[in-house]
Image (cartoon, coloured by chain):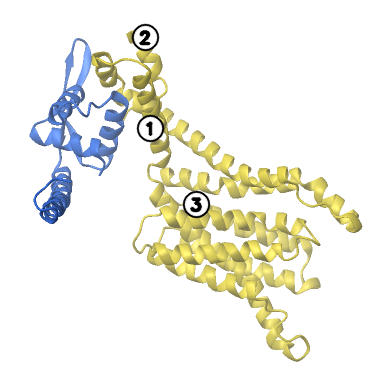
Chain colours: A blue, B yellow
Amino acid sequence: MNEPTFLILTALAGESRHGYAVTEDVEQMTGGRVRLRAGTLYAALDRLRGEGLIEVDREEIVQSRLRRYYRLTAAGEQSLAAETARLREQATIAEGRLRARRADFGGATA
Amino acid sequence: MTEIRYRRLLALYPRDFRQEYGDEMLGVLMADPRPGPAQVLDVARGAVAAHLRGLWIGEGRAARLVQIFGAMLLFAVASRRFVGGLLATVNHFDQVGWQNLPVTSSVRFVAWGVALVAALLGWRLLGAAGAAAGLAGEVLTPAGSYVETPATVLYAYWLIVSAVLVLIAGLVADRGPVRPRGWQWVAAAGVVLVLQGRLEQSGSSGPYELRWMLVLVAVALAAVAIFRQEPRLRARLLCWIAPVIATVPLVEFGFAEFIVYNMGHPESTRMISPLQWAVLVVVPVVAFVGASVLDRRGRVTAAPGR
């Protein structure tokens, strides 16, 4: 799972959101490091819908323009949980190795 | 950027994608505080991805049928030469030894047999190995006589293209065992091809017209198998076989002069030029892409909404 996909699923895990709200939440989550653009966002949303990981929650018309809210499906929740566990496992390994490295250098940072 | 410019940019997307997300995307684009070349590039990249994704939808299932049906027919064609050679070897071993049973012929027969079994069982790796070996056999057989008779490559061209398609289809096909609808028709087409091959190898025992009629019967039987599929799958199958169909007019009309010249001038045989090789590679690709684009257009016209 690539980073934008992970972040979009994470944004939708909290509550159902429309496209622009997803980009804002992702920006907030990453401290401004990632701001999804429209092309990337909707390519990902279309693919995730096709894979059954997200679905349309509801639609509304705001300023005569369609606003569609997306939510995570059960399969999406499962996929996000699996990816989170994988990332946690890798982060734990990295943390352990960094700790060992610091110990090898007598507590000094290299 | 103005709304009109954004709408023009969104026109890069496939129509069905635009109908589904165009309004929403427009809202996000206009709210984006960073308009500029990077934004345009991102939309253009998304449009290309949407086009490619549209071409790819449902491909795994169609590819699976191409893999199975293709392997069945290529196995039948390989059987023709192998069985003929085997019978000649058994009947005249004292005079001719093993010369009627070349290694490439045996490898091709076994390879397509393996590819067929793997295709039916849905074993991707074994299927790819079998198809790759079969493709090597299809290439090596005409390659052996290319210098003396360059046209042999052209006669085997449709087989080589078919083998490449079966290999690619096997790599992208859905997994798991399956018995596709209409397989009996393809099996019957294979039997007819084997019989036709026996008739051809027995020389004067069959009239020329009968041999060609049998080929047409085999084609008709295979066509029945395709037309027995559901419409969506049928359309995709036609896209997959478009490259093979394209080989017939290409050789018939594009290389007719080349073949006739070489037949009349055995002392100064012409080889296939680099440009002609390029055409032989490009035409099947163009046929597939062209058929897929037409199929997609037809799909969008038939179902404007999702």
Quarter location, residue A47: top left
Density class for disc 2 (Cα within 10 Å; few <14, some 14-19, many ≥20) is few
Disc 1: which residue: B50
Q: Does the residue at mark 3 contact the one at mark 1 (Cβ under 8 Å)?
A: no
Tag nearer the camera, 3 or 1: 1
User: Please, what is the three-letter code of the amino acid marked with disc 3?
Assistant: Ile
Q: Is residue B189 visible?
A: no
| Same-chain check, marks 3 and 2 | yes
Q: Find residue A30 and report its horizontal and vertical position in percent.
A: 16, 31
Q: From the viewer's side, name the closer residue of A40 and A108.
A: A108
Q: Earlier in the sequence, mark 3 or mark 2?
A: 2
Q: Secondary structure at mark 3?
A: helix
Distance from Cα at disc 3 to Cα at disc 1: 28 Å
Query: Can you tell which mark lies on residue B226?
Result: 3
Q: Find residue B104 and report its horizontal and vertical position in percent.
A: 64, 72
Q: Mark 2 belongs to which subunit? A: B
Disc 2: which residue: B4
- As drawn, B31 above or below A46: above
The residue at 14%/33% (across/down) is: A11
Q: From the viewer's side, name the closer residue of A37 and B61.
A: A37
